[in-house]
Amino acid sequence: ERHGRRARGSGGMGATDPSPTRPPGIARGLGAVTSNKMRSVIGAIESAGIPEVDYAKLLALFEGKHSKILVSRHAAAITRVCRVHERGFPLRDLPQLCKLFRFAYDQVAAGKAKEFEEALCSVMSNFAKPFRAHNAADEHRSENDVAEAFGMVSECLSAKDMPLSVRLLAAEALRLFASAHGDRPSVLDTVPTPFDGGETSGRDVPESNPGPGAALAGLGAVVKPPPPRKFARNQELFRRGGCVPLVLSGLATANSVGDDQLQLAVVRVLLEASYSADNARALAEGGLFSGLAPLLRTDFRSPIVFHASELMWNVLESVRDSPGGRLETATGTGSKGFCAAFSQLVATALREGHRKSDKELRNELLITARMLAEDGRARASLRVSGLGDVARHVAVHPELGASSTTGLNRLEDGVVHPLANTTSAQDFEMKRLAWELLAELADDEAGVALARGSFVACLLTFVQPLTGASASVEGAGSRWTGRQLRDLQAQALRLLARLAPLCVDELMAQGAGETAVAVASPDSPADDDQRAAALDLLVTMTHADEAAAERLGAAGAVETALHCLEGADAPRPIARSMSSSLDASMYGAVVTAEPGDTRDEGQTGELVESINPTRVGIHPTTSEDPVKLAAASLLAALCDGWAGNRKILRRADGVAILRSFVDAATATDRAVPIALSAAVVYATWRCLVPDTKNCAHFVADGGLAQLLNLLLACTPTLRPVVVSTLADILENPKTHLFFHEWRSTGGRHALVPAGGQGITLMLNLWRAEEGKMGTTRHDGTLVNPENPLRGSAEFVKPDDGGLVTTYSTLTIERSATEEAAAKAAKRDADHMMSRVFAVCSLLGFDNLRAYCSPADALTLTIVERYVDFREGEMWEETEEMFREEGMRPVAADRQHMEASIAEARESALELRDVQREMLAAEEEKARRLEAEFYEQMRMQKEREEAHRWYRRDMSKLTMKERLTARLAKADIIDGSFRGHSSQFLTVHSRDLDVTGGSEEHHARTLEPMTVRLEPA
């Protein structure tokens, strides 16, 4: 509605003066002409239409000895110049034209305003038209001249004795220039398109008209489109020309004159300037609100009030949303005069406004009042001026104090118009804005009295139906429709949570804690948004009052929080919200209707209210479910506030529930937001670790191993809280064995590869922090023994966090958040080192050195001396601080600092020697192992050589020769086969034992013999 109103308002306030057009033939040819020659011809034709004026001769007429008294001729000459340039002033002529107009200003100041009124009106009329350029470069070259020219135009708004007609035309020229002659973008055009694509959004996008997010495959939202170049340039020149303070001075002049027409014209100029963030901040710092005070005392239906309301909205919004901006920088917002006038205007609009346009203006004033109340000075002044009482009356009536005789919607109370107590969209918005305004006015100790009593009772009255009880006041139960009532109930719970830190005693006295527990319970008809708001209220009350934790625990808050955390997939009523910001799908929830439910065309993520009131399931697809987040935060707050709640949690099987969520966080992809994982780990830390029995159950069921697995797989932002939880668990020596027996199951690219030990995981975290600061070399030794924790940029290693990647950056806001978290992690690297030191010291450095690897032992020596290094660095920083502030400590303190710094340096030098000895020992061990390896290889070679002589009657053969002989023998055996009937065997006599006989006989016996073998 805010964007729609502003878009509609811009159309009414942006009346444009049509700029001159080119000849039809040239206009049609511009898009198709590509040659430089043709473009130069077109430029020559355009520039030829710009008349030339001899300004030197004209200035000589003004300053001539005999002609300077001809005042009428001077004015007529200026009028003729304007008539010659009736289509707009040329950019190249602006320096000479400014001289002419300065002459006219001087003549008006000299008391000749009547003679130059017509001439100056012509000048201002021409300034309301776009400038003309001889070529494309004139626009860039003449920026300073344009800024100076409009600065001179702004001067006439506050110039003495300047005619009213000239001031009105000057204001119109400034307005048209600031709006880029009607080319100002609408607010709707500058709003980024919301993310609506990909499976992660949980919404159905029609294939016929996919959104930008779907075109990007769900990887990001559409970037906010830049403003049109001409509009941004004109706004910048408006600021550079000094127009902002001059127009504010013109507003003061218009207020002193009291002319409504001039006031409206100046306010419209300021309104156009306020659409630029830089100009809006300049207006706030220049005292805009003090100048608007007289205008707010006019009739609230006046166009001046309408434009002033839009102007204040723009300025406050720009100041608040600027980087590092605070409303305290705005001048005059806390002045009594402005706050009194503004409060009176709001009260008049509430009392007399009954038309639709009146109600829209009334709601805009309430929005402006809420933004004003964010400033502490304005908040106090608005309360003094009576706006707090008016807002409280609107907030609680007619629900509280309604009269049965006059009728609920016709109550004559003197504060709100009777026709404003309807259920229309404008009056529904008024109720919500009145609640927000009253909560803002009560947001300090001095104003919390506005919220006590009736306002808190009114909010609880709206919440009562969610507990299953009927509303105690007729208005809260029957006046609003179902959808309106649900939105008001969710807002009431949020406002109660906002007021809890200031008036928790009032909330407890009126039963707000028990009511919130009943709303969050599984039997409540509340939807997810209302249940999350109730849990947030319980968290705030627990933090605000230590006694509230015990009372809420006795009321069943622990069991309710466990059910909300565990029962995310259990049936819950669907959130039916009037605004998209309260839709369940905004939290990544996919709404699944029961059979029989239908949807209207065009509805996404929202069931028709009157179709089926039965309970349906909401299955979160991301870890940003607000119910889970609030439930985990509530468990941590309750158990941290009262130890008895830890016993209640154990009996309700809360240990197993939290352990299951820790296990689920380990399997969660790193691209999923870590909000729920962080909340669950923190709840584990505060609910289980401090209690001996809870911690014993958690560790015995594998909880410590699950935390180590989570530390292995989680993002770097989540590591500090996990290591802190481990450190507190390891304070019990009986848990050390679980740590020593843990082995990694990660892959090759994990923080610790498969089979790695827990101490390796911890020391790898330490090495990651060392890499960010560059404190160690590649071999693990210190880079800077003089200051070990400062390191060197030469040895800084890239971060392995991978926080901002294409896959994990699903929205622009999340990308900025992750980048900020990464930078904070680098700045706070010492925090992770202190946690790793705590874990190692609890486990015992000697125990860890007994079984860790040499590389881990080398890093462990640095961890062991971390306290010495940190103490020395702290004393060096203290000494440097004293030196910068010019302070000289006393002798005893100076000696203590010098001794501590020297001790830290000696420890670092000693560590360097120890590391060198460890490296030398490792090198010696490596050389010895290498020598043993070569000796084993030599002996194996000798044994292989000896084995090659495996038979005495065979020659020395290689393996290849042996294979060849074996194959040849097989061929001989195969060739000797002749069939089954007979076989032949060749026998050499040398294989027979031959003795005796003659030599001839012996010669015959040496010949081969063939023996026939008959088959058996």
Image (spheres, rainbow, N blue to C red):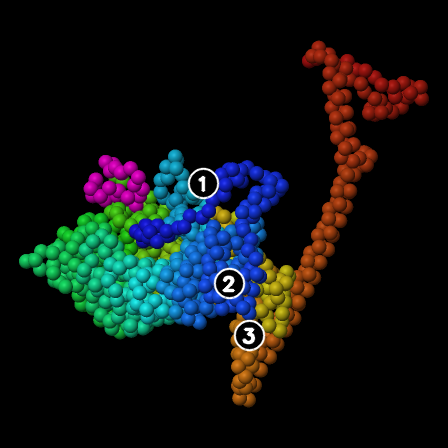
Question: In the image as oriented, which residue stretches furthest toward the right?
Answer: 999
- Magenta-drawn stretch contains 611: yes
Query: Please, what secondary structure does the residue beneath circle 2 have?
Result: helix
Q: In this orientation, which residue lies closer to the viewer: 616 or 767?
A: 616
Horizontal side of 798 relative to 373 (left or right) equals right
Mark 2 vs mark 3: in front: 2
How far across and down, in percent of the image, does residue 326 sit? 39, 67
Which mark is drawn over residue 873? 3
Whether residue 749 appears in this view of the structure is no
Query: Please, what secondary structure does the residue beneath circle 3 have?
Result: helix
The magenta segment: 595-618
Q: Residue at x 58, y 76 (%)?
A: 904
- Residue at mark 2 to residue at mark 3: CA–CA distance: 69 Å
Residue tagged by mark 2? 100
Whether residue 122 appears in this view of the structure is yes
Mark 1 vs mark 3: in front: 1
The kind of residue on which mark 2 rests is Leu
Residue tagged by mark 1? 215
Question: In the image as oriented, which residue stretches furthest toward the front?
Answer: 66
